[in-house]
Amino acid sequence: MRALIILSFFVSPFLGVSQNSDLPSDFLSKDFHKDRRQKLRESLPANSVAVFFANPTRNRANDVDYVYHQDPNFFYLTGYREPDAILFIFKDKQTASNNSRYDEILFTQPRNELREMWTGRRLGEVGAKEVLGFEQAFNNSEFKRYNVDFSKFDKIIFTDFKNDVRDNPRDSSDLYELINQFKVKVKYPEKNSIALTREAQKNNLDTQSLNGLMSNLRGVKTKEEIELIRKAVSISCAGQVEVLKAMKPGMSEREIQGIHEFVFKKYQAEDLGYPSIVGAGHNGCILHYIDNYKPEITSKELILMDLGAEFHGYSADITRTFPISGKFSPEQKLIYELVLKAQEEAMKICKPGTPRQELTVVCRDVINKGLIELGVTKPGEKHMYFPHGVCHNIGLDVHDMGGENLEENNTVTIEPGIYIPDNAKCDKKWWGIAVRIEDDFLITKDGYEHLSTLAPRTVKDIEAMMKLPSALDDFILPSLDKKN
């Protein structure tokens, strides 16, 4: 196959490689992504090809799209951060029309002078070669002419489609069209998933294996990935520390969220790993509370803050729970220290070979016994005060890929919690207390490294930190009320 040079009013033949000297210099290298592709190739079954599609662009409203975020697998294997692209990784060498040999090929969105003026620089096929290190890279408009005989493969491995990609009628090579062209090339049956599974027995389509292959690869982190995760965790801890010093009664949930996210940006974190959770009082009992609307937090309330910075694609996941007044009430302290005890008991078995589920079992045992001792529950009573597991992998996803057992160089969380909503079936003095403590860990050869120690987690350290002055103490904005 050869690339065509197509000239039009919108495409300049003088566009060179898209270079941006303003970008950070500490992204993962092209050698990292090349190595990851090779590791995947080694794990592929004989006579197979793995296929990956870039994430679609998502519309926010009218002519405004959400900020683009690449599919984690696609980024992991390429470093490419643009939409409308497709990647093929072959188990064995293929022969091009000019008799050259290749085992991977990337189709990217093309350079476009007008579009880049509006939406930002693009790499194009030349940039994919020079910047990302691909020997075979072409504009996505060439994919329609890509004539590999897919029937010759024993397996074509890809993730099944969700039919949730919009068609851009002005672009004949957008992701929507790439998917349709791929379906034609591989004789994809336009039927429901059950029918596809049955049809796959007759043809070579495999929509089941890719998740396991990528999970085995991504679960164990490389040295380069661990450094980026360390940075994301440190940034997230710094946000917790600055909020701890700045927090006072009368602040809003949204204001506290803003301090966290300002610190993230100050340290050059590109994004959030997930929507920020800032819940005061009974709002903390909503596990994924992202409204963050409460306009004024009272001095009697705890505030649960679950926020993680995303740095160069890798996400932290840190939760701390603080008393807005600077001092825990007796009931708050008892619940907090029970959650902390549960976490520390789980940390004792945090090592290679331990099933992740076992960490939840340990935490649940500690919390259930502790709630009975406090009189919050009775022996044998079922409750929903601790409704979730405590351990998941972190990385390119906040709930990242990985196996069921801990392995060396996994990066994981331990996050026990107790949530007692208003009107719970217990003494009223416990109502509205919600505590979650979440820390990030690197699994080492014979144990773990606690990555998130910069964020205070004991009652003593929290209360001491809250007495320190904040750089934001004198940051007072003028009133927007015209009457004043």
Image (cartoon, helix red, strand yellow):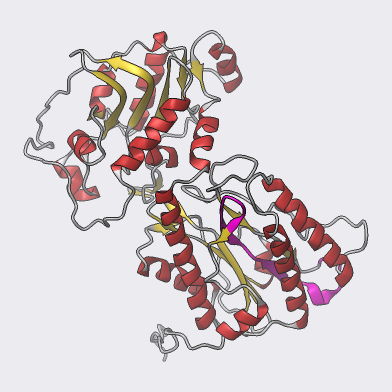
Q: Is residue 408 left or right of residue 44?
A: right
Report the span colored magenta: 424-448
* Residue 17 in picture, x, y percent from top left: 15, 42
Q: Is residue 71 left or right of residue 446?
A: left
Residue 163 appearing in the image: yes
Tell me the quarter of the image containing the N terminus.
top left
Q: Quadrant of residue 309?
A: bottom left
Query: Can you say whether 8 is above or below 29 in the image?
Result: above
Query: Can you say whether 44 is above or below 117 in the image?
Result: above
Q: Is residue 396 left or right of residue 291?
A: left
- Residue placed farthest to the bottom in the image? 484
Query: Can you say whether 268 is above or below 483 in the image?
Result: above
Relative depth, front residue between 13 and 62: 13
* Residue 349 in picture, x, y percent from top left: 70, 54
Q: Residue at x 31, y 32 (%)?
A: 174
Q: Residue at x 59, y 44 (%)?
A: 407
Residue 304 appearing in the image: no
Relative depth, front residue between 179 and 482: 179
Q: Quadrant of residue 178?
A: top left
Q: Is residue 331 left or right of residue 295?
A: right
Q: Is residue 128 magenta?
A: no
Q: Residue at x 41, y 55 (%)?
A: 228
* Residue 116 in picture, x, y percent from top left: 19, 46
Query: Can you say whether 381 is above or below 477 in the image?
Result: above
Q: How many marks?
A: 0
Q: Residue at x 75, y 58 (%)?
A: 363
Q: Quadrant of residue 330?
A: bottom right
* Residue 197 in picture, x, y percent from top left: 58, 17
